[in-house]
Image (spheres, rainbow, N blue to C red):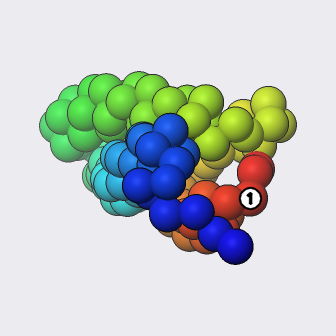
Amino acid sequence: MSMTDEENPAQAVAAKGIRGALARFRVLAYIVGVGLLALVVAMLVKYVGDNAGPMAVVGPAHGFLYAVYLLFAFDLALKARWSVKGTLMVLVAGMIPFLSFVVERKVTHKVRAGEKL
């Protein structure tokens, strides 16, 4: 028999905390993923096109957003009680083009299923 939120308020609060942390993580995972792709394009423009302008804007913006991604991912890891290995894998995913999109899907699936990373 399953308990409702009213029967177990502590579990309901914890679940809401995880839901909020997951939502924040998902938004930042997409933003960082798109930002990383923009960074790759800006690097190409800089080194192939000899124009450092886009890199001067995209580089610091991506760096800042990646730092926020790290905070949100770590927050979710603490609330969902991930392993150190799983946490590190998610943190590194924001540095590899396209990987943040893949990891976001995997994390969302596992967190919603109540599984640990």
Residue 107 percent across, percent down from the top left: 61, 59
Q: Which residue is mark 1?
A: 115
| Residue 85 can be seen in this image | yes
Say if 51 sits above or below 96 in the image. above
Horizontal relation, residue 64 to residue 66: left or right: left
Say if 48 sits above or below 50 in the image. below
| Residue 92 can be seen in this image | no
**Closer-to-camera residue (25/65):** 25
Binning the other alpha carbons within 10 Å of mark 1 as few (below 14), some (14 to 19) or many (20 upward) gives few
Residue 97 percent across, percent down from the top left: 54, 57
- Residue under the point 55% across and 30% down: 74
- Residue under the point 57% across and 35% down: 79
Residue 81 percent across, percent down from the top left: 70, 37
Horizontal relation, residue 92 to residue 101: left or right: right
Q: Quadrant of residue 91?
A: top right
How many numbered circles are shown?
Answer: 1
Q: Quadrant of residue 92?
A: top right
Question: In which quadrant will I find the N terminus?
Answer: bottom right
Residue 53 percent across, percent down from the top left: 17, 37
Horizontal relation, residue 78 to residue 72: left or right: right
> What amino acid does circle 1 point to?
Glu
- Element type where label 1 sits in the image: loop
**Closer-to-camera residue (24/1):** 1
